[in-house]
Image (cartoon, rainbow, N blue to C red):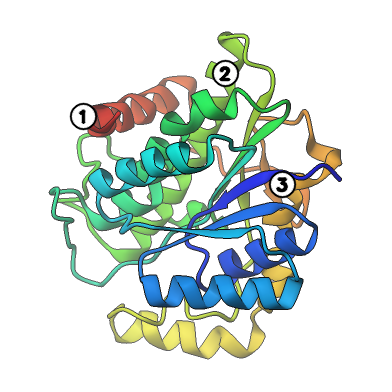
Amino acid sequence: MENKVILVTGATDGIGKETAKVLAQQGHTIIIHGRNETKLNAVADEIRAVTGNKNTGTIKADLLSLAETRKMASEFKSRYGKLDVLVNNAGAVMNRQRETTGEGLEKTMALNLFVPFLLMQSFTEVLAKSPAARIVNVSSEAHRSGGKPDFNDFQLEKSYSQIRAYGLSKLYLIWITRQMASRLKEKGIRNITANSLHPGVIASRFGLDADKGFIIDFLFKLARPFLKNVEDGAKTSIYAAVSPEVENVTGEYFNKQKIAKADDRYYSPGNEKIVWDYCEKITAKYL
């Protein structure tokens, strides 16, 4: 297998860490992202020790800041100059009360939607230099649970709940992935694919570190004994990132290492473009 340069965001725990570890075992050059430098360095050392792959680098950024996200992309390009696979893995369920970032954005949409959009745009030029590049956006089957989109309330000022925010952010992520795939084709860029996926609900700390409210916390903890381990949870991310079977597949949604049907109750090409245009508007000053 050809050695690829792969960036995995949110790679200090859970599925992201396992994805990075397995890809390092396969011999790829892995750059793991995290927001805590101490933890980031510890995970990188662990991956090097477990896999024997010394080509494991780190890059630090708080992705709840689009300015830091942009800075991270610039730093990555100047440091490495090459990228074959972008795995937008970082994501989270936020607190029961609506919160905004320092830039005034609702936190769920910022991390789960605007950051992947910004990174896709920031890295398109460098990905285009790869003979066969891939964008892998980690969505979720929870995209089915956000309810009907309200395009006059992207920031959920009128209708916030944790489940709605998370579900809609992951639905919109699927849509912008499709739109990215279409736009690349329209531009004649055939060497970059863009796909989204459901990774499998796993028994990691996802959903347990913030104040979700009693009911959400209870359900997360109740479900933990029945969830997949991280090895199983990361398989679809790894598959989408490097499997030869999907080398020319683009614009699809994967579940259990197969192309799956996303929930299209609220989908239309027009709605997809509304979401794309809104992401473009939000990130414009950072591109």
Query: How packed is label 2: few (under 14 Cα within 10 Å), some, or many (20 or more)?
Result: some
Horizontal and vertical percent position of residue 26? 80, 58
Q: Would you say 36 lies left or right of 183 here?
A: left
Using the rendered view, name the quadrant where residue 27 is placed: bottom right
Which mark is in front, 3 or 1? 1
Q: Amino acid at mark 2?
A: Leu
Circle 2 is placed at which residue position?
A: 184
Residue 240 numbered tag: 3
Q: Reading the chain from its start, which is encountered first: label 1 or label 2? A: 2
User: In the image, what residue occupies the spot 49% across and 56% down?
Assistant: 9
Distance between mark 2 and mark 3 Cα atoms:
18 Å
Element type at mark 3: helix
Element type at mark 1: helix
| Vertical relation: 233 (above or below) 224 | above
Which mark is in front, 1 or 2? 1
Q: Is residue 48 visible?
A: yes
Horizontal and vertical percent position of residue 33? 47, 59
| Vertical relation: 123 (above or below) 79 | above
Which is nearer the eye, 58 or 151?
Answer: 58
User: In the image, what residue occupies the spot 78% across and 48% down?
Assistant: 258
Contact, CB < 8 Å: mark 1 with mark 2? Answer: no
Q: Would you say 82 lies left or right of 238 here?
A: left
Element type at mark 2: helix
